[in-house]
Image (tube, helix red, strand yellow):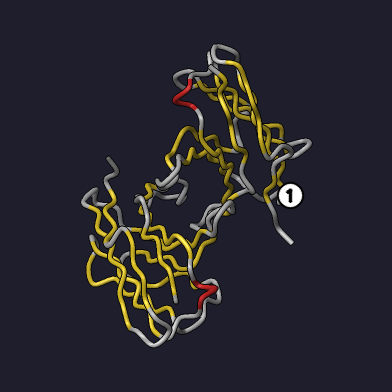
Amino acid sequence: GESVGLHLPTLSVQEGDNSIINCAYSNSASDYFIWYKQESGKGPQFIIDIRSNMDKRQGQRVTVLLNKTVKHLSLQIAATQPGDSAVYFCAESRGYQKVTFGTGTKLQVIP
Amino acid sequence: DTEVTQTPKHLVMGMTNKKSLKCEQHMGHRAMYWYKQKAKKPPELMFVYSYEKLSINESVPSRFSPECPNSSLLNLHLHALQPEDSALYLCASSPLGEDYNSPLHFGNGTRLTVT
């Protein structure tokens, strides 16, 4: 069936280092991809999105890369801070409102 | 603080109870969503409303009954739930653009425990 998954369930990084969170998706018809951050006790928070006609998009300290050839999505966080500690989900949709979430990666920032 | 407000934050109910979860947004979004999230799992889509009409029902059991009274409010009515329905219930909203591709804005959820 359709799925969006992640390679690593937990990622530990040193404060100040860059973090890379990866995501694989299986539906080649997906045309919109989103990264969400979820802190304990809160709902998912939008970080950055990218459409299928792009391969890179940058925000403040975050960059999303999309490789449609291998159906891979990544989130890069520059100069990781303790406040970045959370679970990160990639999500995909196909031009209508059915947004499917991947399994999530827990990012732990070591001070 | 989130712009999507969910009440109550916590709810404990017995299997014979009837209760409702409420969600409110004032961003002018015309799509609203219910998601269910179990511990250490991703959110799973339950229902989508577009322009106050139910547009997606992900084969959710009838003991969950959604309602969208107006463009700002979304309810989830609960009746005869099972212990396995215990979860975090998340409400979200989004604008409806021409291609429907807009990020969801989530509330902080209602933590439901069914005893």
Q: Please state the horizontal and vertical placement of residue B42, each as a whole percent of the image.
A: 57, 52
Question: Residue lying farthest right?
Answer: A70
Looking at this view, is B39 or B73 the one in front? Answer: B39
Please tell me which residue lies in front, B35 or A14.
A14
Where does the N terminus of chain A fall, quadrant-wise? bottom right
**Is B53 positioned to the left or the right of A44 in the image?**
left
As displayed, is residue A61 above or below residue B109? above
- Residue drawn at 51 percent across, 81 percent down: B61
* Label 1: chain letter: A
Q: Position of residue B40 (x, y in %)?
A: 58, 51
Q: Is residue B108 left or right of residue B60?
A: left
For the residue marked with disc 1, what is the amino acid?
Ser
Seen from the viewer's position, the closer of residues B90 and B54 is B90
Local secondary structure at mark 1 = loop
Residue drawn at point x = 40 percent, y = 66 percent? B112
Can you identify the residue that label 1 sits on?
Answer: A26
Give the residue at x 37% y 56%.
B109
Relative horizontal placement of residue A6, taking residue B53 as reference (left or right): right
Residue B10 percent coordinates (x, y): 33, 61
From the viewer's perspective, is residue B58 above or below residue A88?
below
